[in-house]
Amino acid sequence: MRRRAAVLAAASATVALAVPAPAQAHGLVGREDLPIPTWLFVWAAATVLVLSFVALATLWPKPRLEGRRGRAVLRVPAALEALAGAAGVGLFVVTVYAGLAGIQNGTANLAPTIVYVVLWVAMPFLSLLLGDVFAAFNPWRAIGRAAGWLTARTGVQSPEPLAYPARLGRWPAAVGIVAFAWLELAYAQRDDPSTLALLALLYAAAMLVGMTLYGVDAWTRNADAFSVAFRTIARLAPLRWADRRVYVRPPLAGATMLDPRAGTLALLAALIGSTTFDGFSQGPLWSDPSGAGPWLTDRFGDLGLGGVAAREAAATVGLVACVLAVAGLYRLGVRGMATVGREHGQGELARRFAHSLIPIAAAYFVAHYFSLLLFGGQALAYLASDPLGEGSDLLGTADATIDYGLISANGIWYVQVAALVVGHVGGLVLAHDRALVVYRRAREATRSQLWMLAVMVAFTTLGLYVLSATA
């Protein structure tokens, strides 16, 4: 087994050596020359994964994470939940108003920063640390629950919600994540405040209609893209919020309770694939004059699309291709696992090991958006004081600036690399723990995870390349 692991690591590292190491890493600021070359980072990361695999095979003979729900340590008052919901609704109203009434400038208006930094970046970071906090602040969930409470108080008889279709599962949420990624990465007017405000209103309206038809909980747990995505990432957190109680559990343990209903793999592939394309689209293979981006743009131009539409179409193809590539890489690993023992089909294994992708999704997110959170988050100081961008100073912080010296560019790179390695080790841990449940013999469980090790090394290599390949 160890010999195979060593051979696999060597092969993966050899492939990694063929990947070019451009001079800059992804982020808001370019990094300086690193003390060691990028390819050495790849070697080190692959080595850490292999050593982790060997340690798990040797020191982790029984499942330790399965079914660990944790113990309750705190009761949350109902009033606090109501206040959090009201705060979420208030922030939603302010964001929409700023987008519609404020200056139509993406950097001076509060709306784009709330959407792209607070919602899309800060909330997953908080979810990873504190659990599913978005559920408390979710504005459309708060409105739906408040409407249900008022209906019950007034004695109005409302029809029972429809049963949520099992065949839909999390597919609506997966489609929603891809749609938001398209807005962020492909749409030309991505930072137009009024456009974002109108889209926010449309999304909230769609969520309210869905909750009216199928119930608040069923809809938010399956079809609300942001709720489902943040709740999925929150499964890695040491805290779990349920029934107005806070539970403490081992990190990663919550992922083992992911129910692999329809669309779950698509959701995880969308989360990983969208961040992959975000980084890849800034690298030379996509953005150089001879890269895939300009080539696709020219092809769509030949079909009659204008310049902006052609670029949007090219980015759409790139985004979908990255999502499909992530799904295909995972399926390849599952196909290899299915050759071990011959007792479990590919479909069963794909569902039962889907939770091992959650740490990878979180790792890609942290690595990709760390610098945006660190620096873009500072913009809230002056944007909150002048949300419309018209020169007001409501909080006295309108003159605040962004401190780009808070951390060095190399420091950001080290955080990104550490996030990728820790995330992929977490994926290995979850996969190994589940294999000990799925397979009858520990030896078969270990053999099956050689394939998952290959997948994790491939994901790590891809992640490091994406980070290092920005133009």
Image: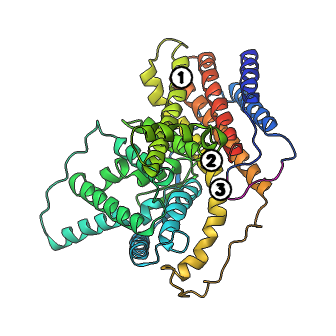
Residue type of the residue flagged with mark 1? Leu
Callout in the foreground (2, 3)? 2
Residue 332 - label: 1
Q: Does residue 232 appear in this view? A: yes
| Dominant secondary structure, magenta | loop
Question: Is tag 1's residue or tag 3's residue first in the polypeptide sequence?
Answer: 1
* Residue hosting label 3: 370
Residue 322 - label: none
Quarter-of-image position of residue 412: bottom right
Label 2 crowding class (10 Å Cα cut-off): few <14, some 14-19, many 20+? some
Relative vertical location of residue 119 with respect to residue 256 in this rendering, above or below: below
Per the model, the C-alpha gap separating discs 2 and 3 is 16 Å
Residue 232 left/right relative to 151: right
The secondary element bearing badge 2 is classed as loop
Label 3 crowding class (10 Å Cα cut-off): few <14, some 14-19, many 20+? many
Residue type of the residue flagged with mark 2? Gln
Which of 453/310 is in front?
A: 310
Q: Does residue 67 appear in this view? A: no
Callout in the foreground (2, 1)? 2
Residue 331: give x, y in percent of width and height.
50, 25
Relative vertical location of residue 240 with respect to residue 445 in this rendering, above or below: below
Label 1 crowding class (10 Å Cα cut-off): few <14, some 14-19, many 20+? some
The residue range painted magenta reads 27-33
Per the model, the C-alpha gap separating discs 2 and 1 is 27 Å
Residue type of the residue flagged with mark 3? Phe
Residue 69: give x, y in percent of width and height.
50, 46
The secondary element bearing badge 3 is classed as helix
Residue at the image position 35 percent from the left and 47 percent from the top: 222
Which of 199/315 is in front?
A: 315
Residue at the image position 55 percent from the left and 19 percent from the top: 337
Residue 282 - label: 2
